[in-house]
Image: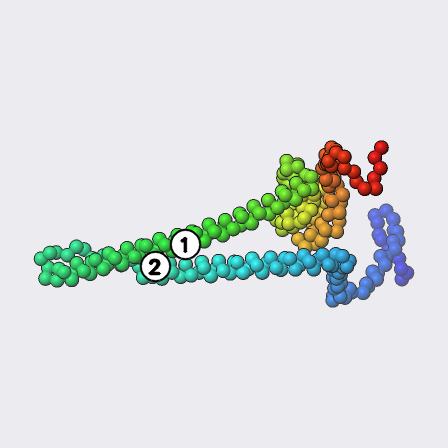
């Protein structure tokens, strides 16, 4: 027969073409080679940025080592006190026997034993109190040291602002604004320690987009960005401070006795 098939209908006979056979598609390979993830771009610094980076790394490492040394000393002292407390708790407060009966045959021995127990109990309580006071003192000293360090930084920071011609109330308002923008503690510390810190704070308060840029970076990269991109602009934007000395009063008279003249000078 031909490629057409007969279809019988109640009224007439028609011919319809047969559906062509579907072509067999080649099966997709079950194992596909996964695409390799692109390598992250390498960060390259200029010589100036690298020098700043190395300087920041050095300062950060030095501060970290000093902080670790202080923390280690505090840890050792704390462990010593805790060991003393643990030893006291293991030993426990001595049990004090009841007052002996005067008619007991060993009355004097019992009185002596009770007196020794009372003394040991008093020493126990005194030692516990002394250790607890030492722990409290250490905690207060550590807290006081942190507060003093921060106070010294703030004092230095305020002194720099005064030299740069920045008013305290303006610096306070700018500092609050920058803090509300979410600058991290490490970056804030970097600005606080910088010689131009007050000027940088004032500049950042007026340029919130720069703050957003800093927030998107890590602490070290942010410090480099501040040194290379912001510091110069902040210095240029700070108030101009006159460094000229105050005018001195012109002396009146020659200060020489009347009738005396300098040699070689003609007076008219």
- Looking at the image, which residue sits at the far front? 259
Q: Position of residue 31 (x, y in %)?
A: 74, 67
Q: Which residue is mark 2?
A: 89
Q: Position of residue 198 (x, y in %)?
A: 67, 43
What residue is drawn where x is 83% and y is 35%?
267
What residue is drawn where x is 66% and y is 59%?
57
| Residue 35 seen from this side | yes
Q: CA distance from mark 1 to mark 2?
A: 17 Å
10 Å crowding of disc 2: few (<14), some (14-19), many (20+): few
- Looking at the image, which residue sits at the far right? 2
What residue is drawn where x is 56% and y is 49%?
149
Per the image, label 2 sits on a secondary structure element best described as: helix
What residue is drawn where x is 71% and y is 42%?
203
| Residue 208 seen from this side | no
Q: Earlier in the sequence, mark 1 or mark 2?
A: 2
Q: Quadrant of the C terminus?
A: top right
Horizontal arrangement in the rendering, residue 72 relative to residue 262 (left or right):
left
Q: Nearer the viewer, residue 211 or 30?
A: 211
Q: Which residue is mark 1?
A: 134
Q: Nearer the viewer, residue 138 or 102?
A: 138
Per the image, label 1 sits on a secondary structure element best described as: helix
Q: Position of residue 16 (x, y in %)?
A: 87, 53
Horizontal arrangement in the rendering, residue 168 relative to residue 82 (left or right):
right
> On screen, 27 above or below 99?
below
> On screen, 257 above or below 125?
above
Q: Quadrant of the N terminus?
A: bottom right
- Contact flag, marks 1 and 2 (Cβ < 8 Å): no
């Amino acid at each position: 027969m031909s490629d057409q098939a007969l279809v019988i209908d109640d009224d007439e006979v028609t011919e319809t073409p047969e559906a062509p056979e579907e072509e067999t598609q080649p099966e997709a390979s079950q194992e596909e080679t996964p695409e390799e993830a692109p390598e992250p771009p390498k960060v390259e610094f200029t010589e100036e940025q690298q020098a700043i980076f190395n300087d920041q790394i050095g300062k950060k490492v030095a501060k970290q080592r000093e902080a670790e040394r202080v923390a280690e000393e505090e840890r050792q002292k704390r462990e010593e006190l805790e060991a003393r407390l643990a030893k006291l708790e293991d030993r426990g407060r001595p049990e004090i026997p009841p007052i002996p009966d005067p008619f007991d045959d060993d009355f004097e021995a019992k009185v002596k034993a009770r007196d020794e127990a009372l003394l040991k109990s008093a020493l126990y309580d005194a030692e516990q109190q002394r250790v607890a006071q030492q722990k409290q003192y250490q905690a207060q000293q550590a807290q006081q040291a942190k507060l003093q360090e921060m106070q010294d930084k703030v004092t230095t920071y305020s002194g720099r602002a005064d030299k740069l011609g920045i008013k305290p109330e303006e610096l306070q308002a700018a500092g609050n604004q920058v803090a509300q923008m979410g600058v991290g503690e490490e970056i804030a510390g970097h600005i606080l320690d910088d010689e131009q810190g007050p000027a940088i704070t004032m500049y950042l308060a007026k340029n919130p987009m720069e703050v957003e840029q800093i927030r998107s970076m890590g602490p070290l990269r942010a410090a480099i960005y501040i040194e290379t991109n912001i510091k110069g602009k902040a210095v240029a934007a700070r108030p101009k401070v006159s460094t000229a000395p105050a005018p001195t009063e012109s002396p009146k008279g020659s200060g020489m006795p009347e009738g005396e003249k300098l040699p070689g000078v003609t007076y008219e």
